Image (cartoon, rainbow, N blue to C red):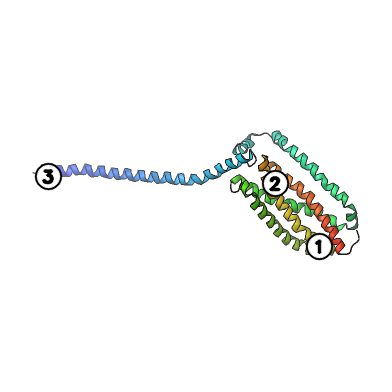
Amino acid sequence: MAAKKKSPTSSAEPSSSALNELKETIKSQAAEIDRLKKQLSSAAPSKTPTSKKVSSGGHAHGGAADNEEILDYKEKTFYAIAYERVWWLAIFLVSLSFTALIMNGFEHTLSKQIELAYFVPLMAGHGGNTGGQAVGTVLSALSAGVISRSDALRVVGKEAMSGLVMGIILGALVGPISHYVMGISMHVSTVVSVTFPLLSTIASFLGSSLPFVCVILGLDPAVIAAPAMTSFVDVSGLMCYFLIANRIFKLFGLEL
């Protein structure tokens, strides 16, 4: 009788151990599934920008930072990079020569009001800085796929308005400082204050629009947009500076 009672107990023990093993296996598999799900969810966002980069580059035929071009850059030699860029720099160097023509054209104004010459480097530097910010922002947004060609008007308008606001703020600071601290005449300080908003607007407009123009034309905005912006801003900004100076000097009753 005792032997017969032991047999159900001994048969139940292996079955319970097998059930425990099965439960442990199911738990480990569930944990592995959860781990794989987390890996997939963390990898999903990184795929989106890559696909967007490829699509934006496809619109531009190499204009908006193709992945292949980015990878090729590591393998390019220094003379290949120089050869690709020097021609564009030569073109923009020719355009920068117009600044000398503008200075010659307003030589009479400069001879009468030599203080204007003090602010020529300041105007050129500020225009380049303002446009450079816009170029960098738009290029980053294009390469990340955040914006596309369809957003051009909205982006350019927003950048131009931000340039106007920045120019008003900086002009309101630089003008009084140049007059009361540096001892610059009131009429020249007024010219500087009035030129800053216009120059900042032009620089932001060109800096934000030229990357889109390069993309539309199938050119590389990373190589072309920044030097093109600098050249155009220098020429247009200097022209505006002297034209505003002539107008304000007349309002002050000065003979030129």
Q: Earlier in the sequence, mark 3 or mark 2?
A: 3
Along the line of sight, which residue is nearer the eye, 25 or 129?
A: 129
Density class for disc 1 (Cα within 10 Å; few <14, some 14-19, many ≥20) is many
- Write the residue at 15% across / 43% down: 8
Task: Locate residue 240: give its quadrant.
Answer: bottom right
Give percent across and percent down for residue 148. Answer: 61, 46
* Numbered mark located on residue 146 in the image: none
Task: Locate residue 252: give its quadrant.
Answer: bottom right
Horizontally, residue 39 falls left or right of residue 213, namely left
Q: Amino acid at mark 3?
A: Lys
Density class for disc 2 (Cα within 10 Å; few <14, some 14-19, many ≥20) is many
* Numbered mark located on residue 190 in the image: 1
What residue is shown with label 2?
Answer: 210
In the displayed structure, 13 sits above or below 129; it is above
Q: Is residue 184 visible?
A: no
Q: Is residue 47 visible?
A: yes
Query: Which-is-in-front pick, marks 1 and 3?
Result: 1
What residue is shown with label 3?
Answer: 5
- Do the CB atoms of the residues marked 1 and 3 lie less than 8 Å apart? no
Q: Amino acid at mark 2?
A: Leu
Density class for disc 3 (Cα within 10 Å; few <14, some 14-19, many ≥20) is few
